[in-house]
Image: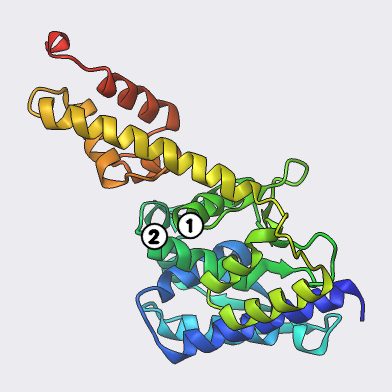
Amino acid sequence: MTQSEMGEQWSEAAAREIADSLHARVSCRHGSVLAGFLRCSGQLTQGAIEVTVNGAAAWRSLRCLLAAAPVRAGDPVEVTMAEGRLRDRTRRRAHWADPGHRLSMWAGLIEGGRPVQGLARRLVIGPPCCALAAVTGAALAVASWSAPSARRAATTLACPSAATSLGLRGLARRAGLATQIGEAEPLRLAVADDDITRFWSMVGAPRTAQRWQRTRDLTWPDPEGTRRRPSSVNGDRSVAAATAQTAQVREVMEKYADVLPEVLAAAGWLRLDFPTSSLEELGRAANPQLSKDTVYGRLRRLCAWSPAEEI
């Protein structure tokens, strides 16, 4: 069996475990899982949604999610099948009729009468649990997992657009997952080698992730623990900087909250509500959303505030 076929086998095993968890309990997260799934594997056609699904487990999950959706999707109008390299990785292409685009609008593929280029607004500004659920749906739909015997292991998510890959990276960060966008391949979102086990554990396949890690440790032992974790180091630095800024903001807010300009006070409360979030994440959490530079400028002015600046 080739490295690619072994990777497909592990991907299918993880998809089966996630599918079992989705079938075991229907929750409010199912909507976000479905939105992430359709965003990465679906496309709009004339009065229908066309979805490409790899593997029997992902197909079973999609049917379960659609059955739990408040918008009736019905049965697929047409299903075509093409055999993959493995028997259980059969590729299915299905068309669901969507009169009035009700399912598309509910899943966030259409907002305001226009197709969404990136992710739906409710996913971007939603709570971390919904962010993780959307990443779970994307992983079910388009994630590929390298074999544990590969020298450089990786999990990649093939996104349909650069806006989607950027959006998923933001959702993954809010959920506490470290991902990277390839410079040469901006449509691919990659999980670093040392974060793969944690990624699959958080999206709903902990047993498969543990088996994969044990196999990898036997293949590429690291007795001295010398493997570097650059993504974790960068994440720690970001959290440390956010925590230090939060302490400054809290001190200013305690003294001058009543006399601060409205925009600075709003930025201060936003930072206190999300004490470890990055500036980019704060901008997405704001209502209306703000750019990272705008958030940085307002927080910098807030930290430097003095009563003499009061107008």
- Which percent across, then down, holds residue 222? 76, 64
- Give the Cα distance between marks 1 and 2: 9 Å
Query: Closer to the observer: label 1 or label 2?
Result: 1
- Which percent across, then down, holds residue 231? 61, 48
Q: Quadrant of residue 102?
A: bottom left
In the rendered view, would you say 118 is above or below 307?
below
- Nearest the eye: 50 or 193: 193
Mark before the other along the chain sequence, 1 or 2: 2
**Which residue in the structure is indicated by mark 1?**
176
Q: Residue at x 70, y 81 (%)?
A: 12
In the rendered view, would you say 46 is above or below 186?
below
Q: How is the image coloured?
A: rainbow
Under mark 1, the amino acid is Gly
- Which percent across, then down, holds residue 206? 57, 78
| Badge 1 density bin: few <14, some 14–19, many ≥20, Cα 10 Å | some
Q: Residue at x 57, y 53 (%)?
A: 178
Position of residue 22 in the picture relative to residue 138 (left or right): left
- Which percent across, then down, holds residue 299? 31, 27
| Badge 2 density bin: few <14, some 14–19, many ≥20, Cα 10 Å | some
- Dots 1 and 2: beta carbons under 8 Å? yes
In the rendered view, would you say 44 is above or below 268?
below
- Which numbered tag is attached to residue 301? none
Q: Residue at x 58, y 45 (%)?
A: 233
- Residue 81 visible within the image: yes
**Which residue in the structure is indicated by mark 2?**
128
